[in-house]
Amino acid sequence: MKYLNVMFDCGYGSTDVENSCIKNYGADEKSSKTYKTYSGIQIDLSKFDDGQFVLNDGSLILLENGSSVRTYISVDVNGIGKKPNRLGKDLFMFQIMNNGELLPMGAKGTDYYSENNEYCASTSSNTMNGAGCTINVLTEI
């Protein structure tokens, strides 16, 4: 964060629940319903709760650095207060690969790559639908 123009440090979504920007109470019914998949299903917030901060332009940065997954960096480009708050529409994911390379999610080799668009299709019911759209958004002309 010391290299970015951070306006507000939201802490951790699961351990600093009351102060976090995206509150993750786990499976509890009071968990945040802020973000949804590309097709409109509530998402699992555990991929977005290991660090959260708001940049001066209002963008929200969400980090995941769990032991069972690689590091994810997600960006809500227009901030939490502006809709649609959906994966693949205004919330985009990136992955830091084992070799240190930063790739847009959906690129071949990332955790949410799929040849059949399982992670980026309006008809997909996958709980991480939209995660794989980042590569599409960056490569569309």
Image: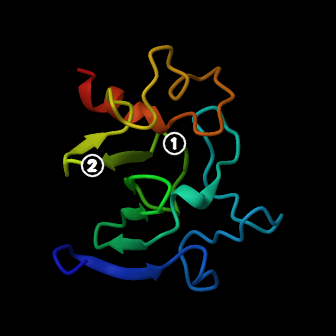
Residue 134 seen in render: yes
Tell which of 112 and 124 is nearer to you: 112
Tag 1: Cα neighbours inside 10 Å, few (<14), some, or many (≥20)? many
Query: Mark 1: which amino acid?
Result: Leu
Question: Tag 2, which secondary structure?
Answer: loop
Quadrant in the rendering for residue 127: top right
At a point 51% along the width and 60% down the height, the residue shown is 48
Instruction: Tell me which numbered mark, 2 or 1, is placed earlier along the sequence.
Output: 1
Residue 76 seen in render: no
The spot of residue 72 in percent (x, y) is 39, 54
Question: Tag 1, which secondary structure?
Answer: loop
- 135 vs 121, left or right, is left
User: Given contact means CB atoms under 8 Å apart, are the residues at marks 2 and 1 in contact?
Assistant: no
Tag 2: Cα neighbours inside 10 Å, few (<14), some, or many (≥20)? few
The spot of residue 55 in percent (x, y) is 31, 71
At a point 26% along the width and 41% down the height, the residue shown is 103
The spot of residue 18 in percent (x, y) is 64, 85
Residue 82 drawn above or below residue 58: above
Residue under numbered circle 2? 98
At a point 34% along the width and 26% down the height, the residue shown is 136
